[in-house]
Image (tube, rainbow, N blue to C red):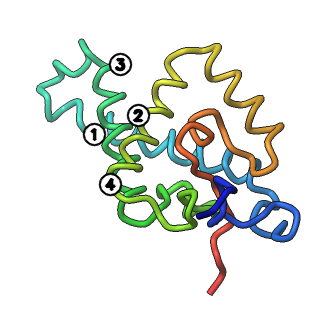
Amino acid sequence: MHTNPYWGLPDPETGRAFYDGVLRRRFLAWLVDLVLITGLVMLAIPLTAFTGLFFLPVLWLAVSFLYRWATLSRSGATWGMRFAGIELRNQDGTQPGATIAAAHAGAYLAMTMVFPAQLISIAVMCASRRGQGLHDLILGTAMINRAQI
């Protein structure tokens, strides 16, 4: 039995290359994903006969959740993360499945909706050895640099 809860994730001391620049890349990925999600929402509004404008925050949250869940569960990275060259890994080092991807997307959106929680998550991300946000610490996940093959 493993006593280290992160036994499958690379060690930040011996595997620095996995975490070098991840904070900057996460921010870049966040910006790209924000633009993509906003674009998807704008495309969805006419499909709702413009009634989507009346519940825009709910529509944005639904599109954001579905986008993050679908992309994370398929490849361990949103399109923004792929662009930035990072991917999400479980504590055992594997890519997240549908359940962890849904939990990650939900926890991320919950942190985003509660401003103090978002600030705490950013602070934790800057201070933690693996650059994990609060939702990553809760789920035991981490962002790492994607292997260049």
Mark number for residue 74? none
Marks 2, 1: nearer the viewer: 2
Amino acid at circle 2 = Gly
The CA distance from mark 4 to mark 1 is 25 Å
The CA distance from mark 2 to mark 3 is 15 Å
In the image, is residue 38 above or below residue 84?
A: above
Q: From the viewer's perspective, is 116 left or right of 45?
A: right
Mark number for residue 57? 3
**Residue at x 80%, y 57% (from the top left corner):** 21
For the view shown, which residue lies furthest in the left direction?
49
The CA distance from mark 4 to mark 3 is 24 Å
**Total number of numbered labels?**
4
In the image, is residue 20 above or below residue 134?
A: below
The residue wearing badge 2 is 106
Secondary structure of the residue carrying numbered label 4:
helix
In the image, is residue 106 above or below residue 3?
A: above
